[in-house]
Amino acid sequence: MKRIYLSILLCLMILRGLAQQVPFLDEGSAIADYPKVDWLQGEPISHFDKDKIYVVELWATWCKPCIAAMPHLNGLHQKFKDKKVVFIAQDVMEADVQKVLAFVKENGDKMSFRVAFSGMRGSDFDTKWVRAAGVNSIPQTFIIQNNTLVWQTDPNMLNEEVLQLLVDGKFTIKDAEAIAKKHN
């Protein structure tokens, strides 16, 4: 009887462990849908259009490097918004949506792109992207093209030349890193 009880307990522990595992997200992973978030600015999206390129920037109001990157990203957004490149500032690792709303309102001219809020650990976005991609610090940039994560990088690695490679369908991580290194 004791063995049966221990076997059942072991099976339950294994099942619980499997249920808590997070799917792995890496370059080359297929991504069709945007996780559930609160959209604070711009038109919400629920899925990725194969004909568009998405730049998803993970940030928070308390993150100084994130804030420093916003004018750069906004400039890229202004230059590429008519070339089917969609920029999303995805607030993560932050609990106070009112603080984020106030920040966006105060910095509207520096953040002309979509802005979304996901909250703290355990949110849909946190589970499907942050934890799944092994993100433990921000800022962090995800590039999605043809419903595939093509690059996970730092926003300072993005520039007009790299985005043009994406638009022209000639993007490779090796070329993007070489271009970024040349400019940094």
Image (tube, rainbow, N blue to C red):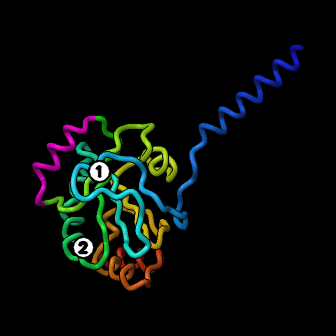
Sequence-wise first label, 2 or 1: 2
Q: Can residue 164 be seen at all in this image of the molecule?
A: yes
Q: Quadrant of residue 12?
A: top right
Please state if 44 lies on the left or on the right of 102 as rendered: right
User: Which residue corresponds to the image point at 57% horizontal and 45% vertical from the top-left?
Assistant: 22
Please state if 134 lies on the left or on the right of 181 as rendered: right
Q: Quadrant of the N terminus?
A: top right
Residue type at the position of mark 1? Ala
Q: Quadrant of the C terminus?
A: bottom left
Reading the image, the residue beneath label 1 is: 116
Q: Position of residue 165 (x, y in %)?
A: 38, 82
Q: Nearer the viewer, residue 152 or 143?
A: 143
Q: Position of residue 154 (x, y in %)?
A: 36, 62
Residue type at the position of mark 2? Lys
Q: Quadrant of residue 108?
A: bottom left
Residue 176 colored in magenta in the image: no
